[in-house]
Amino acid sequence: MRDTLILSYRDEPLREFVLGERALEVGRGAFCDIVIHDPSVPERACRVVRLGGVPSVDFGDGRSPVGLPVGEKLRLGRHHALVRVATASPAPERGTEPLTLPSLAERVSIVVGRGAEARRVALDRPITVGSGPGCDLVLGDRAVSQRHCRLEPVPSGVRVRDCGSRNGTWVGGRRVSLGEIGPGAVVRVGRTDLHLVPRGAAGDARDGGRMVAASPAMLSLLGEVEQLAQLSWPVLVQGESGAGKEGVARALHERGPRARGPFVALNAGGLPRGTVESELFGHERGAFTGAAGEHRGVFEQADGGTLFLDEVGELPLDLQARLLRVLETWEVRRVGAERSRRVDVRLVCATHRDLRAMISDGRVRRDLFHRIHRVPLVVPPLRHRPEDIRPLAERFLADAAPEVGCRRELTPDAEALLVAHRWPGNVRELRSVVEVAALRSPTRRISREDVRRALERVAGVPEPDLSEDAQLRSVVRQYGGNLSAAARALGMARSTLRDRMRKGETKRRSDDEAA
């Protein structure tokens, strides 16, 4: 059976609307699906939705939606009404059956705000955004209307609909009344940005094969990756050593149309000066002393796929000029060759250095910088995204299980110590510490002392033996005093964190009085 809504005026039918899985907005506003030209009808009168397969009317005033039986009139204003009728669905022609697309609710969240104040909202159903108390997502922003906009997951993306707001709903610098967007998009309402980011495994952590993220910063970055993966443009990934730049490059490769092609990585800063040219562009047999056979450079090896060129700023200036030539023509000439070879490569460069400063010093060509800086991505250091520490540690423990003999797990005190550490070596250092702790732990549960010893062993300097109270206060300081954000990073309830901190404060006062 197919449900249809008939809009009538003075009991005379005007139009028909098929009620599918998508909710229909009803009201006087131009943003509505069913527009009623009657001054007595509110801008947004109601929504007709399916709840458990049953058509229902949601008035958006805090009341529970009510069912809409077949044949019953829903009065709207002085002369209009909606009537639900059920008709037999026509049998689909052979080969025209609709495709079932995966629900975006399983793949997208909304990140509201930035840094310690950021929060995530799962987009598992249509939500209304505004400053009014009846909204699903209430924003304390005076520039946001009481009922500002609506975000609705659909198979092809997220439908954003402005609800007649004063200041408008903006996407990509354009004011929209109705449109569809996807992961990586930013919706601007008032002075607030709503970032659409990918969701993944349980706990809202993103597990993309090599990438694990739970922090708003990394989820937002992966949203950008989802957008850029479909392009062929060069990308520059910036960030500290060990922060995960290669993981971002692999994610760009694996989420794009080149996923079936090769992924080739080369660290330009780790090669002797005499071999860089050969590694990049290849050489012919006899091109130089020791060239006993021909060699394909990384551009040829990555043909049809992605080349990840790490520490691009370390390339000598003459090779930077050759690299720029390749990016302009997509042709490479091996050392000692007479002709060039055409390649089809997506180039992703990375650096932990300030390339603009290196331009001023004459160590990086300005024209090359602007060619590879077309789409920059910045990977934040681990100390700026402590929410990622726990899911990353769990991933590393799972990876290490075959080597250490069994799956280890961290005690809450051990997790708190990991979150409190500053991680100058970023994710690479975290992996080493977790693996050492798992190897040396005498039991399946890794204790705080196991982690402390592992930190000393990996860092080479004694780790301060902080009390639990000091660790908790250190984590809260990282979040600017935001207990909710700190509790999420520690994997505990806000009330638990608050009680532990109060207990520690009471103990400190007692110790001070005793002294």
Image (tube, grey):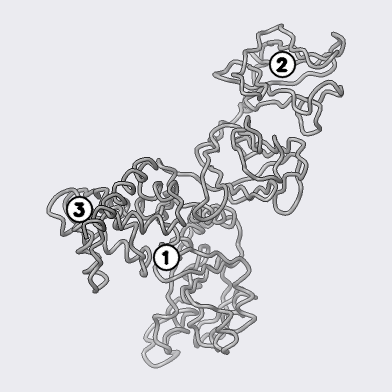
Name the amino acid, label 1.
Ala
- Up/down of 332 relative to 94, above or below: below
Q: Nearer the viewer, residue 449 or 224?
A: 449
The label shown at residue 70 is: none
- Up/down of 40 relative to 340, above or below: above
Give yes or no for contact between labels 1 and 2 (Cβ–Cβ under 8 Å). no
Residue holding disc 2: 4
Name the amino acid, label 3.
Ser
The earlier-in-sequence mark between 3 and 1 is 1
Which SS class for mark 3? loop
Residue holding disc 3: 447
What distance separates the C-alpha of mark 3 from that of mark 2? Answer: 62 Å
| Circle 2 Cα neighbour tier, 10 Å, few/some/many (<14 / 14–19 / ≥20) | some
Give the quarter of the image for residue 17. top right
The number of discs equals 3
| Circle 3 Cα neighbour tier, 10 Å, few/some/many (<14 / 14–19 / ≥20) | many
Name the amino acid, label 2.
Thr
What distance separates the C-alpha of mark 3 from that of mark 1? Answer: 25 Å
Among all residues in the image, which is located at the extreme left?
442
Residue holding disc 1: 243
The earlier-in-sequence mark between 3 and 2 is 2
